[in-house]
Image (cartoon, helix red, strand yellow):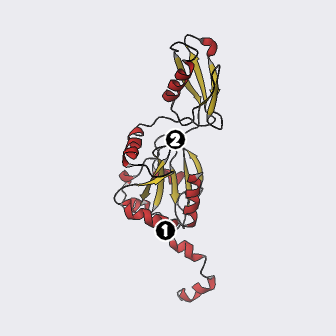
């Protein structure tokens, strides 16, 4: 919900937001807090934990839970919209946001109440495919499946390319580094393409969001009467 609010804010005030980001774009990525800003140690810990990120469970995911010594407890569970699953003889357990290894440990801990040192295997059967979203001044804003290694420029092409109203010198890329934190980076796509420095093209990660702001000229265009342009037209 807070991410939606942020994107809505950008749609109405893109120039002010982008200029703020651009001031520090040459030094380091910005960190956008979903909640209150944590201390530097917690941010560092979040970044380190996400260096090789594992898939986090989402509502709608389906998993198989197998008990090696108690096959009667074998079951298939689905993550409910509220993030809980229902386990035999245990009841509800909140699992959304956990990785499969973390879920395995949680289920094992829960079943120690009824079993002695249970041996449990959890297999992810159905899950949401990796995706990215593109919004703002692109041809076709929306959600796209992330297949293989995709760069920012390639993702923009999948989203229909940049429109004439886009400010492609300040494209925003949002990446979630933890449950509460987003990292925002400003990418000068115009300069990168002009100089043919595609080695600097950013590689997307699942869940990344791209936002292309509107340029100032296109925002002014709707406030200038069409008749006013006639005096500036060259005489043929």
Quarter of the rendering occupied by the C terminus: bottom right
Residue 1 horizontal/vertical position (percent): 60, 51
Image position of 149 with respect to 107: above or below: below
In the drawing, what numbered circle is on residue 16? 1
Whether residue 151 can be seen here: yes
Residue nearest the observer in this picture, 208 or 29: 29
* Image quarter of residue 235: bottom right
Secondary structure at numbered mark 1 = helix
Residue ID at (56%, 62%): 9
Residue nearest the observer in this picture, 74 or 214: 74
Secondary structure at numbered mark 2 = loop
The numbered mark, 2 or 1, whose residue comes first in the sequence reads: 1
Looking at the image, is mark 2 or mark 1 nearer the viewer? Answer: 1
Dot 1 crowding, Cα within 10 Å, few <14, some 14–19, many 20+: few
Q: Residue furthest front?
A: 113
Marks 2 and 1 sit apart, C-alpha to C-alpha, by 33 Å
Residue ID at (51%, 69%): 215
Residue nearest the observer in this picture, 104 or 152: 104
In the drawing, what numbered circle is on residue 78? none
- Whether residues under marks 2 and 1 lie with C-beta atoms below 8 angstroms apart, the answer is no
């Amino acid at each position: 919900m807070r991410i939606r609010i942020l994107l809505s804010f950008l749609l109405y005030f893109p120039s002010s937001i982008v200029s703020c980001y651009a001031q520090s774009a040459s030094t380091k990525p910005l960190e956008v807090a979903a909640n209150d800003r944590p201390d530097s140690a917690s941010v560092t810990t979040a970044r380190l934990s996400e260096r090789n990120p594992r898939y986090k469970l989402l509502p709608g995911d389906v998993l198989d839970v197998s008990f090696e010594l108690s096959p009667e407890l074998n079951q298939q569970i689905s993550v409910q919209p509220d993030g809980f699953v229902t386990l035999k003889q245990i009841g509800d357990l909140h699992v959304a946001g956990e990785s499969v290894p973390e879920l395995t440990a949680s289920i094992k801990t829960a079943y120690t109440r009824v079993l002695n040192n249970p041996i449990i295997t959890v297999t992810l059967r159905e899950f949401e495919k990796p995706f990215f979203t593109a919004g703002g001044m692109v041809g076709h804003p929306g959600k796209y499946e992330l297949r293989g290694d995709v760069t920012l420029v390639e993702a923009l092409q999948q989203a229909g390319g940049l429109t004439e109203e886009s400010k492609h010198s300040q494209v925003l890329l949002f990446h979630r580094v933890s449950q509460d934190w987003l990292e925002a980076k400003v990418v000068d796509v115009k300069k990168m393409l002009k100089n043919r420095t595609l080695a600097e093209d950013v590689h997307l990660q699942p869940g990344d969001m791209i936002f292309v702001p509107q340029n100032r000229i296109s925002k002014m265009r709707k406030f200038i009467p069409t008749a006013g342009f006639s005096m500036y037209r060259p005489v043929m």
